[in-house]
Image (cartoon, helix red, strand yellow):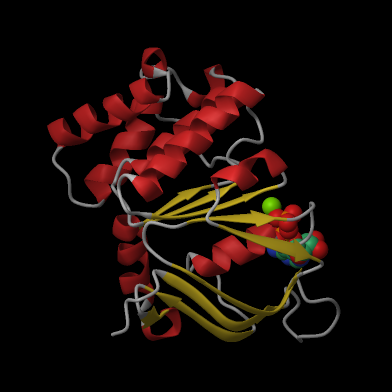
């Protein structure tokens, strides 16, 4: 297995309609990212950023081309293997957070750790420490419906980082945050790549993030420009 790249897209095209006609959401994309590297994916709304990230995370399949994760073609994983690998090795910050509304904030974070095999106490301690790092330790017992968008966004970031995943993918992780808080999140993600040798990929249309990135990819109408 070639693990030179943490994640790679090889000639990837994605159509959302099953007949492969109409407009491609992504067209013939080649991309690779390594440990210790932070990539910024820039592009306006509709340019294909979310499609790019969800394909890269193995959350959907390309119409053509290949996706590689940790040196292996995702098409060669069974669905169960892929799910288990994602739970342990990939942290994803969803654009719309996807918090579970019937569980308090702390449980939302702890459950990804227990799902990946952590004991309860370790999960509680680590989850709390991430909430505190993000300045929302006081919200541990709150229900997601009772917190603001910016706070939900930080919970989503904590959840993506808490497992120590080698690949962190963040879809517009600063979209709901005041600029200072947003930059704090970017600094945290940067520390994941520099200090913890993780592979970090961020989609955004915030040009201020450019200075933090090792690599900038610009998408326009589904193509790298
Ligand atoms: N589930 C879907 N079904 C059909 N079309 C979609 C779907 N998701 C995205 N698209 C289309 O694919 C294109 C790229 O979307 P997306 O990847 O969400 O871009 P971005 O994240 O940059 O806003 C857009 O034209 C969008 O309308
Ligand atoms: Mg998007």
Where in the figure is residue 212, as x and y percent of width and height?
Answer: 55, 44
Q: In this rendering, would 167 be left or right of 125?
A: right
Q: In this rendering, would 197 be left or right of 221?
A: left
Where in the figure is residue 155, as x and y percent of width and height?
Answer: 46, 31
Q: In this rendering, would 193 be left or right of 171?
A: left
- Residue sticking out furthest to the top: 138
Q: Residue at x 35, y 79 (%)?
A: 71
Q: Quadrant of the C terminus?
A: bottom right
Q: Is residue 101 visible?
A: no
User: Is 53 or 208 nearer to us in this picture?
Assistant: 208
Where in the figure is residue 38, as x and y percent of width and height?
Answer: 49, 54
Q: Quadrant of the N terminus?
A: bottom left
Q: Residue at x 52, y 37 (%)?
A: 186
* Quadrant of the rendered image containing residue 199: bottom left
Placement of 36 over or under 164, stated as above or below: below
* Quadrant of the rendered image containing residue 173: top right
Where in the figure is residue 97, as x and y percent of width and height?
Answer: 55, 40
Placement of 106 over or under 174, stated as above or below: above
Quarter containing ligand 1?
Answer: bottom right
- Residue sticking out furthest to the right: 22
Report the number of discs: 0
Q: Residue at x 36, y 65 (%)?
A: 83
User: Is 208 or 68 nearer to us in this picture?
Assistant: 208
Q: Residue at x 40, y 35 (%)?
A: 158
User: Is 129 or 152 nearer to us in this picture?
Assistant: 129
Q: In this rendering, would 189 be left or right of 131?
A: right
Q: Is residue 56 visible?
A: yes
User: Is 105 or 129 nearer to us in this picture?
Assistant: 129
Placement of 77 over or under 184, stated as above or below: below
Placement of 151 over or under 52, stated as above or below: above
């Amino acid at each position: 297995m070639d693990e030179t790249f943490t994640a790679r897209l090889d000639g990837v095209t994605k159509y959302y309609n099953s007949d492969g006609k109409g407009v491609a959401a992504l067209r013939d994309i080649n991309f690779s990212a390594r440990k210790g590297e932070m990539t910024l994916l820039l592009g306006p709304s509709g340019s294909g950023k979310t499609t790019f990230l969800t394909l890269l995370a193995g959350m959907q399949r390309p119409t053509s081309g290949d996706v590689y994760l940790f040196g292996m073609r995702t098409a060669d994983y069974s669905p169960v293997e892929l799910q288990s690998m994602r739970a342990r090795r990939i942290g994803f910050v969803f654009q719309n957070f996807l918090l579970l509304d019937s569980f308090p904030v702390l449980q939302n974070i702890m459950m990804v750790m227990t799902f990946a095999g952590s004991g309860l106490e370790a999960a509680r301690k680590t989850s709390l420490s991430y909430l505190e790092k993000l300045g929302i330790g006081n919200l541990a017992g709150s229900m997601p419906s009772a917190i603001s968008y910016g706070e939900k966004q930080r919970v989503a970031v904590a959840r993506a980082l808490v497992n120590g995943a080698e690949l962190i993918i963040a879809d517009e992780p600063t979209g709901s945050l005041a600029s200072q808080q947003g930059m704090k999140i970017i600094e945290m993600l940067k520390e994941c790549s520099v200090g913890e040798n993780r592979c970090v990929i961020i989609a955004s249309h915030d040009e201020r993030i450019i200075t933090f990135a090792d690599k900038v990819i610009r998408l326009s109408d589904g193509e790298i420009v």
